[in-house]
Amino acid sequence: MIHAVKGTRDLLPPGTAVWNQVEAAAREVFRTYNYHEIRTPILEETQLFARGVGEETDIVTKEMYTFEDRDGSSLTLRPEATASVMRAYIEHRMDQRPGVQKLYYMGPMFRRERPQKGRYRQFFQIGAEAIGSASPDVDAEMIELAMDILKSAGLESPVLLVNSVGDANCRPAYIAALREELRKISPKLCEDCQRRAETNPLRVLDCKVPEDQPLIGQLPSIHEFLCGECKPHFQRVWELLNDRKLPVKLDQRLVRGLDYYMRTTFEVVHGALGAQNSVLGGGRYDGLAEALGSKVPAPGIGFSIGEDRLIMTVEGNLKPQPLDLFVAVLGERAVEQAGQLAREVRQSGYSVEVSADGKLKRAMELANKLGARYTLIVGDNELAAGRYAFKNMASGQQEDVAREEIARRLQTVN
RNA sequence: GUGGGUGUAGCUCAGCUGGUAGAGCGCUGGAUUGUGGUUCCAGUGGCCGUGGGUUCGAAUCCCACCACCCACCCCA
């Protein structure tokens, strides 16, 4: 047997209906914020991610699907979309277009990690980027947009965490100070933290080991080190978020794993997701364009929703759409008539399934299994009378109706 | 990459003090003529994850491998 490769999965009906509903809800919210869709290739030159995401990140060093093309060039299945969007922005000189470029995307991403709950090797993201402004006002709107989408998609009680990770001016000083402090307390921390204290001090702040928390709480905060540009930027974002009555929590320990993030970073977490409890992550990336070789600066901010995770939290809340009408066909002569009736009802916007010619009992059974709201019987009696047996499947009530009546009857909510 | 758990019918699982397999659900058909859901009856369906070993005999015991799940790491 050939089956789906590790970490990938088939999405089948009726589950796909939830995906469609979430995506439709997101598109609608994007529209109201004047965001427009961008579709970039799933394949990119490996260099794009190495330079964009960061040579030393886990994503680039051990999680990318990279392979050699037949001409010898190195290609990679995109592990995230921001680098691609920025590449397209630069390549198509979108900086020449009027105003801030507000773009959204949705689609599959690929990372070769060990699969677990809420984590797949092919997973789906819904994301947005606003490129062309360094203003904190854009940050606030971006976060508001993100929260609106989650709400519209049906996510209940999201927790929004916000922080600043500084920039190239102030972050190095903070990391140095952090290292210094960690050197003192490192032996008292968990094994992982002792290692992280050396390799990636910021990650210590992420530690979840309960015993470590008091010590980690004593460590210096990035906010003591924010420079003359980062500090007011963050203050402004914070003010705007509070003005908008968003349920923000300052998380001084929030760090992000991609190199391009600077200043504002944010995340939305949700319980009942298992260990991978982050539904959305994002932040500002003002240096990204230059890292990709752009001559013109292109400050931006964006976020990405883990669609698989979002759907884990909302599936079950949403009911699949029912079949409006099942047409039971009795006898060869009824086939053509049934087809015409079905076409008429479909043109009125209702879903219709037409049975194969056969026994009525079989047809009724199938109508019931498909969850049809109504069944229309088309047989010799109906052909002769010009009226059709129309049955409400929930109540069991049945009556004869004229063909013009059918679509109107379907309006009834039962 | 590391650790733990689980692999028996399409699905959820039982059987595991060794004697070549069961239930519920599903699916198909029947309870006579053009009426579903409830009920009853029958049928369908499994190389018991794979390969070795112990044994007269293995789903059951031992070993290896594989797959899936969960967790670490990291992230969405």
Image: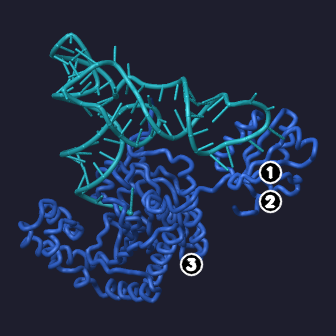
- Binning the other alpha carbons within 10 Å of mark 1 as few (below 14), some (14 to 19) or many (20 upward) gives many
Which residue occupies 33% across, 55% down?
A59
- Binning the other alpha carbons within 10 Å of mark 2 as few (below 14), some (14 to 19) or many (20 upward) gives few
Name the colour scheme: by chain
* Residue kind at label 3, given as amino acid type: Gly
- Residue under label 3: A99
Using the rendered image, report if marks 1 and 3 lie on a common chain. Answer: yes
- Residue A367 percent coordinates (x, y): 69, 45
Which residue occupies 45% across, 76% down?
A143
What is the display colour for chain A? blue
Q: CA distance from mark 3 to mark 2?
A: 50 Å
- Residue under label 2: A409
Task: Say which of B9 and A75 sits in front.
Answer: B9
Q: Earlier in the sequence, mark 3 or mark 2?
A: 3
* Residue kind at label 2, given as amino acid type: Arg
Task: Say which of A349 and A358 sits in front.
Answer: A358
Q: Earlier in the sequence, mark 1 or mark 3?
A: 3
> Compared with residue A307, is residue B61 higher up or lower down, i.e. above or below?
above
Task: Say which of A134 and A141 sits in front.
Answer: A141
Label 2: chain? A
Left or right, A288 with reference to A182: right
- Residue A239 percent coordinates (x, y): 40, 89
Which residue occupies 56% across, 50% down?
A14
CB within 8 Å, label 1 to label 3 = no
Label 1: chain? A
Chain letter, colour cyan in render: B
Dot in front, 1 or 2: 1
